[in-house]
Image (cartoon, helix red, strand yellow):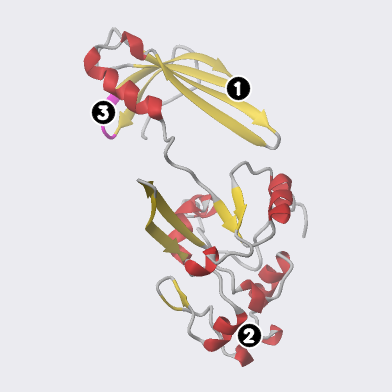
């Protein structure tokens, strides 16, 4: 949200909150790379709340904790905000799902320093049911559907050999230890589900470019000069940056 923040104790700044308007704030405490505390003015000027943000290293990752305190000093009319915030997002969960064996996923997760839950769907129909994985027979048949339409994922038998792979596609496949034909039988997708009264409902799915909003790298590139003018095979894992 728009603001004029500076990490200096005593610095006053304003947050332009979409649903609450302009909020007056003041920096209370700063511990570089560890902690930030600022006062958050409520609708009652004499009863400010405090926002405390702490950073803690966990392996190769950083845990960010945000605590909004001081709600007990607010009038009853504003207590509903505390009730809403207190609940957080306890009913929402994010899981990654891949078809590789669980032990391999866990090893890769440790290597990357990732903290999100990651499940293996190996041996199940999960990926196939949601049209993100395909058998070799489906691929050769030309009837595969991806992103709600027939897609280039499917190919005739004389088009999926190694000699038919695009140069950059072959490099991308090799970077994960496989060939192009096998690589394009696994595609990206995101689905949302809701559990209500013991029944699981499929509420949303997105594929291909519909996932761009979830890719942090692309969001930064789209705001930089040159945007996504990638040339050659530019993908790197964070522990491969010094490799040619």
163 vs 158, nearest the viewer? 158
Q: Which residue is mark 3?
A: 20
Inter-mark Cα distance, 1 to 2: 52 Å
Q: Which mark's residue is nearer the viewer, 1 or 2? A: 2
Q: Of marks 3 and 2, which one's residue comes earlier in the chain?
A: 3
Q: Residue 81: say if magenta.
A: no
Instruction: Where is residue 216? Give x, y as percent.
Output: 52, 49
Mark 2 Cα-neighbour bin, 10 Å: few <14, some 14–19, many ≥20: many
- The reply, left or right, for residue 113 in relation to residue 70 is right
- The reply, left or right, for residue 165 in relation to residue 11 is right
Q: Which residue is mark 1?
A: 34
Question: Which residues fall within the magenta stretch?
Answer: 18-22
Q: Is residue 60 above or below residue 209?
A: above
Mark 3 Cα-neighbour bin, 10 Å: few <14, some 14–19, many ≥20: few
171 vs 27, nearest the viewer? 171
Instruction: Where is residue 197? Give x, y as percent.
Output: 35, 46
Q: Main secondary structure of the magenta part?
A: loop
Inter-mark Cα distance, 3 to 2: 56 Å
Instruction: Where is residue 229? Give x, y as percent.
Output: 54, 64
Q: Which residue is mark 2?
A: 160
């Amino acid at each position: 949200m728009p603001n004029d923040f500076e990490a200096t104790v005593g610095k006053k700044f304003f947050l332009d909150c979409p649903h609450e308007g302009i909020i007056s704030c003041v920096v209370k405490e700063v511990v570089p790379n560890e902690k930030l505390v600022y006062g958050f003015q409520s609708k009652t000027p004499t009863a400010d709340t405090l926002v405390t943000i702490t950073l803690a290293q966990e392996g190769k990752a950083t845990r960010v904790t945000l605590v909004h305190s001081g709600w007990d000093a607010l009038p009853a009319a504003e207590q509903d905000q505390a009730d809403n915030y207190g609940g957080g997002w306890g009913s929402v969960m994010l899981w990654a799902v891949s078809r590789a064996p669980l032990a391999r996923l866990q090893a890769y997760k440790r290597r990357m320093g990732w903290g999100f839950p990651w499940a293996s769907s190996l041996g199940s129909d999960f990926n196939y049911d949601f049209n993100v994985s395909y058998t070799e027979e489906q691929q050769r048949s030309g009837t595969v559907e991806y992103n709600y339409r027939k897609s280039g994922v499917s190919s005739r038998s004389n088009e999926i050999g190694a000699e038919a792979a695009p140069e950059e596609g072959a490099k991308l496949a090799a970077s994960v230890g496989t060939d192009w034909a096998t690589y394009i039988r696994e595609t990206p997708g995101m689905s949302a589900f809701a559990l209500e009264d013991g029944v699981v409902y499929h509420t949303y799915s997105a594929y291909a470019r519909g996932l761009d909003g979830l890719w942090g790298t692309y969001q930064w590139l789209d705001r930089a000069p040159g945007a996504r003018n990638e040339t050659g095979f530019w993908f790197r894992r964070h522990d491969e940056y010094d490799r040619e």
